[in-house]
Image (tube, rainbow, N blue to C red):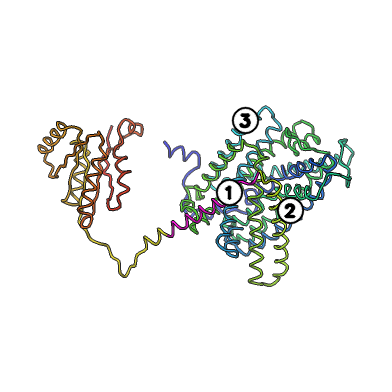
Amino acid sequence: MVNKVKRVLIGRPMKSKEIEGEKLGKLKALAILSSDALSSVAYGTEQILLVLMAAGFSALWYSIPISFAVLGLLFILILSYRQTIFSYPSGGGAYIVAMDNLGRSTGLLAGGSLLVDYILTVAVSSSAGTDAIISAFPVLHDHRVLIALIMITLLTLMNLRGVTESASVLAVPVYLFVIAIFVLIGSGVVKYAMGGIHAATPEVEATVSNISLFLLLKAFSSGCSALTGVEAVSNAIPNFKKPAAHNAAATLAMMGVILCTMFIGISLLAYWYGIKPDPQATVVSQIAESTFGRGTLYYVIQGITALILFLAANTAYSAFPLLAFMLAKDKYMPHAFMVRGDRLGFSNGIIFLGVTSALLVIGFGGNTESLIPLYAVGVFIPFTLSQLGMMIRWLKLKPKGWVLRLAINTVGMLTTLGITLIFVITKFSHVWVVFIFLPLVMFLFFQIHRHYQNIAQQLRISVDVEKPVMKGSTIVVPVAGITRVVMNSLGYAKSLTDNVVAVYVGFDDEEIKRMEQKWAEWNPGVRLITLRSSFRSIVRPIMKFIDTVEWKTSETDHITVLIPQFITRHWWQNMLHNQSSLVLRAYLYNHKDVVIATVPFHLQK
């Protein structure tokens, strides 16, 4: 039953040789890897306006120069990550760059920050998508967490079906969103040019008494939330068709052009329309309503915007499993993240991402405003470390044209570092948890790595010197009576060695005597040891007996506890029987010199 449900949800298993068919072309990659960056235009301008409103309505004209400054940083990041793509075509982005040029600790900081960023990407995208739905249908406000969780579940299942299939599904809404925003911008510009806008507009270069450089920098850093997701292409290069690096670079350039056009278009329309932040309606919602009214086009744009904000999380679903794979390969995360699932994706990473992001949404009550500062810090730390790592690379290698490359990365590093510091200073009450969580993540990385090193050291042998040690064998078979299950287990034990002993635990002398008489009549050729339990425990007397056997014979014999167990035909029938064998097995795991084996006997009815 479980397998049938699994097949329905994620599809048929795929052969390993089908992996090349799961690679992405530029158009599909743009849809699946750029959805986060492109969708950020739905809230990037709004974040700038929210900060500027602290200085009053007249300060909103600053959103235009701030938006151009954000685009300047985007241009630098695009150039920088193109260099990263060609320098590190195996993928990994900031983690690989920092690990290679700045050392292990810095690399793990970048890797941990990226993992946090991807988890927050899913949480923020699902929350922002929910906000877009609520803007159109306010009656759903009390169900925002449930809506976000449903979308996370659907995205998780979609990605478990494979990269190609999820990209094919996602390409349609992503490109519909791009078209819808361009239609909105075009229609809005035409309406403004024809004098169809009568809203109050902030006066350009108006004197604002309470504006400060600090407030402008804070607004700039908030607007840079629109740049999240830019690094995803450089992280996921292995997902591209060959030549992977060239396809990834082309995809990054296309994403930059589209994002630049949409972001500045929304910012200009928000200024021309005199849009102010409204907790009941997003900036895009207000622009669409001002342009088209609350008609069909308005609801189409809101629906597509909500959908793309949900689907923006898919960028994380593509990049997180690959990054987790690289960390696991370097022995900093559990090896389970290296396993490809039935559909050739890193399914454990996908599931882990879905679960952790769902917990975040629940913990923050689906509040996008609370999540975005955490989100931005999570992405700008890797931005900064990646730029710094590339600076060190150019200084070490000094290839042709390295001075210009160094200059690009230096400007990018200083800018992203400044934005990170602004976020930390201005929104410390929101982001303080990052400074607790990231060290814990790094500590966990080191502990996992130390564990794997210790395991390797203990398992490693000298093939020239160390050989298998031959010992005898003592098999202990716990029995609850004389049954076919016991007979089957004893037969198997005697086929391995003549040194077999059966152990029976009774609760009173009469019960023990009756068992000894039946055993003597049956005479299976195996000695029976009977133990009396004064406290009605089966496990404790058996454990004491095994301790005695282990103490006496462990140096000369391998000790095996062979546990008889019958297997019911239906899963629910297991609940009708006690599970003492499971308890015994759990206790025996602590005995390093005891081998635990189970002999199953399958019931027919």
Which disc number belongs to residue 257? 2
| Local SS, label 3 | helix
Residue type, numbered disc 1: Ile
Q: Is residue 459 left or right of residue 38?
A: left
Q: What residue type is labelled 3?
A: His
Q: In this view, does 290 lie to the left or right of 389?
A: right
10 Å crowding of disc 1: few (<14), some (14-19), many (20+) = few
Q: Nearer the viewer, residue 254 or 407?
A: 407
Q: Are marks 1 and 3 in contact (CB under 8 Å)?
A: no
Viewer-side label of 1, 3: 1
What amino acid type should be assigned to the residue bearing mark 2?
Val
The residue stretch that appears in magenta: 430-453
* Magenta stretch: includes residue 494: no
The residue carrying pointer 3 sits among few (fewer than 14), some (14 to 19) or many (20 or more) residues within 10 Å by Cα, namely few
User: In this view, which residue lies farthest toward the left?
Assistant: 521
Who's the residue at 86% across and 36% down the image?
A: 199
Can you tell which mark lies on residue 436?
1
Provide the residue designation for mark 3. 143
Which is nearer the N-term, disc 1 or disc 3?
Answer: 3
